[in-house]
């Protein structure tokens, strides 16, 4: 296990190197930060995936002083069909960076950002930061969505019901409300509608 700092945020990384002879791999500890940096360069940003999200939610479920912000990108399938995989990947990367930058401005370094699915993100933060982060992020994302489209399509897509949109759902407290992670995720999906 290692804790690597990516974009000023600690990111837990679990990797088990295995030498062909079954021995220790001392060089790997020096190589791990470079591998993470390469992942950041290739993907634009490193956001912990579903397994780490579940681990984090297990850690905070039922605790006082913890809130969640769910960020969901709607109509990504339509966007991908119209503009291709590369363009949709660019949108996800841009939105990830906007979330990270907004978190840097409003929250604490120990707050958590995770990627639940292809188009859904979850942020774990204290309730005192929830409203400010949510509002700032909502404004930033709403202002940006139209710019993901080519200039020639923006006017038409502004009127379309299949246009990209970003929905946020807030959960101000996890204390005494949930027993299982699946309940939290179901509630967040319900709240975003």
Image (spheres, rainbow, N blue to C red):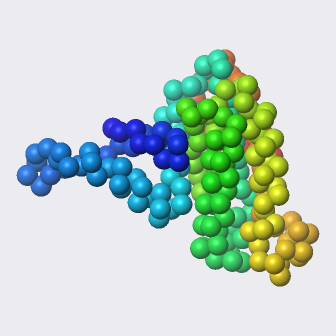
Q: Nearer the viewer, residue 76 or 113?
A: 113
Image location (x, y in percent) of residue 153: 83, 78
Q: Which quadrant, please, contains the N terminus?
A: top left
- Note whether 77 is above or below 31 in the view shown: below
Query: Which residue is found at the position 59% from the left and 73% from the top?
Result: 86
Q: What is the quadrant of residue 109 in the picture?
A: top right
Looking at the image, can residue 177 be seen?
A: yes
Looking at the image, can residue 190 be seen?
A: no
Badge count: 0
Drawn side of residue 73 relative to residue 158, left or right: left
Image location (x, y in percent) of residue 100: 62, 47
- Note whether 86 is above or below 189 in the view shown: below
Which residue is the extreme one toward the left? 21
Query: Which residue is found at the position 36% from the left and 49% from the top?
Result: 33
Query: Which residue is found at the position 48% from the left and 34% from the top?
Result: 55
Q: Nearer the viewer, residue 90 or 174?
A: 90
Image location (x, y in percent) of residue 132: 78, 35
Which residue is the extreme one toward the bottom? 152
Image location (x, y in percent) of residue 40: 47, 57
Q: Nearer the viewer, residue 91 or 36?
A: 36
Q: What is the quadrant of residue 125 in the picture?
A: top right
Q: Nearer the viewer, residue 94 or 22?
A: 94
């Amino acid at each position: 296990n290692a804790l690597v700092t990516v974009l000023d945020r600690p990111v837990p990384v679990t990797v088990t190197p295995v030498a062909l002879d079954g021995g220790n791999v001392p060089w790997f500890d020096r190589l791990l930060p470079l591998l993470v940096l390469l992942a950041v360069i290739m993907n634009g940003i490193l956001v912990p995936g579903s397994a780490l999200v579940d681990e984090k939610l297990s850690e905070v479920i039922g605790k006082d002083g913890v809130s969640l912000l769910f960020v969901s990108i709607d109509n990504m399938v339509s966007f991908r069909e119209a503009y291709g995989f590369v363009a949709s990947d660019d949108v996800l990367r841009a939105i990830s960076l906007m979330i990270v930058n907004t978190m840097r401005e409003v929250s604490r370094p120990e707050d958590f950002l995770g990627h639940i699915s292809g188009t859904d993100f979850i942020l774990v933060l204290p309730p005192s930061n929830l409203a400010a982060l949510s509002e700032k992020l909502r404004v930033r994302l709403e202002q940006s969505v139209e710019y993901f489209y080519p200039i020639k399509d923006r006017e038409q897509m502004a009127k379309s019901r299949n246009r990209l949109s970003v929905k946020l759902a807030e959960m101000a407290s996890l204390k005494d409300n949930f027993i299982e992670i699946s309940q939290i995720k179901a509630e967040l999906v319900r709240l975003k509608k």
